[in-house]
Image (cartoon, rainbow, N blue to C red):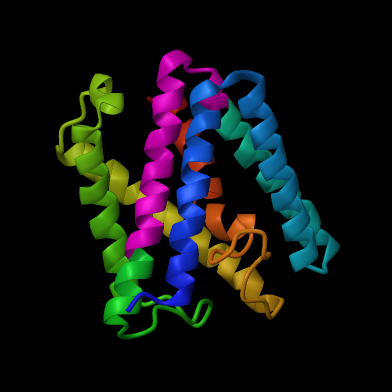
Amino acid sequence: MISHELKQRILSSIILIPLCIFFINIGGILFNIFLLMLFSLSVYEWIKMNNKIIFHFCGIIFLSLSFLSAFILRDNFNEKGELLIFFLILIGISTDFGGYLFGKTFKGPKLTKISPNKTYSGVFGSYIFSIFFTYFLLQNLPFFFELKFSLDINLFLLIFILSSISQFGDLVISYFKRLSSLKDTGKIIPGHGGILDRIDGMIFVFPFALILNFIF
């Protein structure tokens, strides 16, 4: 029996995923406006969630750097920028979905008091989905064929590291939600919560991915 929350998540995803694909694919001014809207909503949720000025200041700086990283990754790498953003989002979504599915199905020991809903089974599910689901789509979607990925140790480690960073970001936002006694950062997305609830992992992945691009 599918829960009401899961039904809401699925319906919201059916709407949101194609919308994100559209803006990322089209790029240019529309993508920039889309990023600006997400940034503004994220800052609003962050300020509303915290009542300390120092948290406001640090959070706004970090969010600015994160969204700037997404902008640079999409617009400064020519046609590969679009594929790179999709690749990073794919890891984030599969990490989140794997953690949710395994956590709800197998439950088990709690991972940390910071986020009571996080379990070790959820962490395992996040890694399983992010590695194998991402690799499956990379190999079977024509959109990604030009990247010519093969599941070697380098790709395995890259996905593992990015999934770990995504999960870390989830825990960071969960920590601040717990400080404020909040379940969600907002209510704008039915079944998901706020914008920060959905992009908590990705806002940490984008800056890291940009650093990797500059290094390698």
Give percent across and percent down for residue 208.
48, 40
The residue positioned farthest toward the top in the image shown = 78
Q: Is residue 188 above or below residue 27?
A: below
- Residue drawn at x 69%, y 30% is 33
**Can residue 212 be seen at all in this image of the molecule?**
no
Give percent across and percent down for residue 108.
30, 85
**Can residue 186 be seen at all in this image of the molecule?**
yes
Give percent across and percent down for residue 155.
23, 38
- How many marks can you see? 0
Which quadrant, please, contains the C terminus?
top left
Give percent across and percent down for residue 214.
46, 25
Q: Is residue 98 above or below residue 136?
A: below
- Residue drawn at x 34%, y 75% is 103
Which quadrant, please, contains the N terminus?
bottom left
Q: Which residues are magenta?
A: 72-98
- Residue drawn at x 54%, y 56% is 198
Q: Is residue 105 above or below residue 165?
A: below
Which corner quadrant of the image does residue 134 belong to? top left
Is 3 contained in the magenta span?
Answer: no
Q: Is residue 68 above or below residue 204?
A: above
Which corner quadrant of the image does residue 68 belong to? top right
**Left or right of residue 147, residue 19 in this image:** right
- Magenta segment, prevailing SS (helix, strand or loop): helix
The residue positioned farthest toward the bottom in the image shown = 109
Viewer-nearest residue: 138 or 174: 138
- Residue drawn at x 41%, y 59% is 96
